[in-house]
Image (spheres, rainbow, N blue to C red):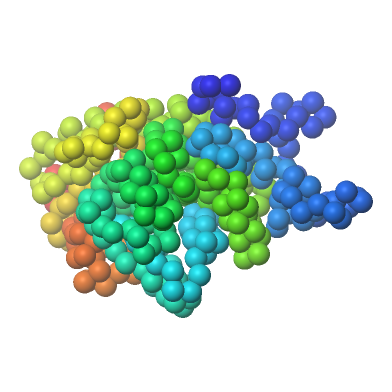
């Protein structure tokens, strides 16, 4: 199987009793046998905190879509970030993060990693190629940053990290496996909040990690079940169903976003529009991407303007998440990055008037009319 959609539909499926789709194995534990007492691998099902057939089906499917050796499904995107980092880090290790990060990742760094005496340093994503990685255990970036939508040069960063003995971790949530696959360009670990594009319907919370090397995946898997960050089978089932239409949905997200960006660029009420295709000197590794997803960032200068705009939207509903089939709007300084103080917001270049649009797959003309009427009320 070579095609993305073919893999998404067929890989990993369990046709129990000739079922066309994989059943939900809604059980906490499994019957034991002599072989299982001697085994400690993920395909010998013992206890669902460790492994579950419905979960394994989705792990295999997603790993194939990401070009990974295997994968680990977790209870959330933050569980995926936390467990994948803690599986390789020890006291006094250093992690170099891109300065532009999801607010939840910032909070985890401040409230968790600091307690383990792990050194965390921050460098703007467009300056990372000039940074020395020789004393770092991990370099952590978002392929497409939240919410400012800067592209990280994964190919160059992977080469430099490996030359200097570091691992490259990439949170690829905003791009999705359909638009971009970091492992193909040398990343060691790829992380997703499946709550976003992969789940795509705003009805599950799951995370996923895949990697280029099986030993690293095994470490992350052990960290997951030791911490109790396991997913539940029902959400794995829902996500597997959603994955089968990922390419169709991403195509529409990509198309709608590009049309809306063209509209926003011409509007006099908007100080700035950010979208990856507008970036100068797009890194070579993104040149063949089918698109950049449905997230757009605009600056309306003040929080009052941002609130007035968001409150007057009818189809774009105010919510903190993104990447579902419905269009959403949020104000990052009040939501995703609310844990940051003014100094941290400034360092992250998050404007008080910044607005993040998550463009859904509705008819684009309806979305354009909604944006226009709300902007006119500022």
Q: How many marks?
A: 0
Residue 329, given in percent of the width and then of the height, sits at 31, 49
Q: Nearer the viewer, residue 162 or 294?
A: 162
Q: Nearer the viewer, residue 184 or 23?
A: 184
Q: Quadrant of the N terminus?
A: top right
Residue 20, given in percent of the width and then of the height, sits at 72, 26
- Is residue 139 among the parts visible in the rendering? yes
Residue 309, given in percent of the width and then of the height, sits at 21, 51
The residue positioned 41% from the left and 55% from the top of the image is 165
User: Outermost residue, left direction?
Assistant: 268
Q: Nearer the viewer, residue 94 or 202?
A: 94
User: Outermost residue, right direction?
Assistant: 34
Q: Nearer the viewer, residue 138 or 349?
A: 138
Q: Quadrant of residue 264?
A: top left
Image vertical order of residue 291 relative to residue 150, above or below: above
Residue 201, given in percent of the width and then of the height, sits at 49, 41
The residue positioned 53% from the left and 49% from the top of the image is 209
The residue positioned 92% from the left and 51% from the top of the image is 34
Q: Quadrant of residue 177?
A: top left
- Is residue 31 among the parts visible in the rendering? no
The residue positioned 36% from the left and 64% from the top of the image is 135
């Amino acid at each position: 199987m070579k095609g993305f959609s073919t893999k998404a539909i067929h890989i990993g499926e369990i046709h129990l009793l000739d079922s066309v789709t994989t059943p939900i194995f809604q059980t906490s534990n499994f019957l034991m046998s002599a072989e299982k007492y001697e085994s400690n691998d993920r395909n010998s099902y013992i206890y669902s905190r460790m492994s579950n057939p419905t979960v394994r089906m989705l792990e295999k499917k997603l790993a194939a879509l990401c070009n990974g050796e295997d994968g680990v499904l977790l209870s959330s995107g933050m569980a995926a970030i936390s467990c994948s980092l803690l599986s390789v880090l020890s006291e006094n290790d250093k992690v170099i993060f891109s300065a532009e990060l999801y607010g939840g990742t910032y909070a985890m760094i401040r409230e968790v990693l600091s307690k383990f005496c792990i050194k965390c340093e921050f460098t703007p994503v467009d300056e990372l190629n000039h940074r020395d990685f020789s004393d770092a255990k991990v370099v952590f970036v978002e392929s497409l940053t939240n919410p400012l939508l800067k592209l990280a040069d994964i190919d160059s960063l992977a080469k430099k990290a490996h030359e200097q003995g570091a691992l490259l971790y990439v949170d690829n949530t905003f791009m999705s496996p359909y638009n971009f696959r970091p492992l193909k360009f040398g990343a060691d670990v790829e992380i997703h909040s499946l709550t976003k594009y992969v789940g795509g319907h705003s009805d599950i919370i799951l995370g996923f990690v895949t990697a280029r090397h099986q030993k690293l995946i095994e470490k992350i898997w052990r960290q997951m079940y030791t911490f109790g960050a396991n997913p539940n089978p029902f959400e794995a089932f829902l996500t597997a169903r959603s994955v089968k239409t990922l390419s169709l949905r991403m195509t529409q997200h990509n198309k709608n976003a590009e049309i809306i960006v063209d509209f926003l660029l011409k509007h006099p009420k908007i100080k700035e529009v950010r979208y990856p295709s507008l970036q100068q000197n797009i890194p070579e590794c993104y040149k063949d991407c089918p698109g950049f997803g449905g997230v757009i960032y605009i600056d309306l200068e003040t929080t009052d303007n941002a609130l007035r705009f968001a409150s007057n939207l009818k189809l774009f509903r105010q919510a903190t998440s993104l990447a579902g089939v419905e269009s959403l709007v949020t104000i990052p300084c009040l939501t995703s990055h609310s844990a940051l103080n003014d100094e941290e917001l400034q360092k992250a270049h998050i404007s008080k008037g910044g607005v993040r649009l998550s463009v859904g797959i509705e008819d684009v003309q309806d979305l354009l009319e909604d944006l226009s009427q709300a902007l006119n009320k500022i």
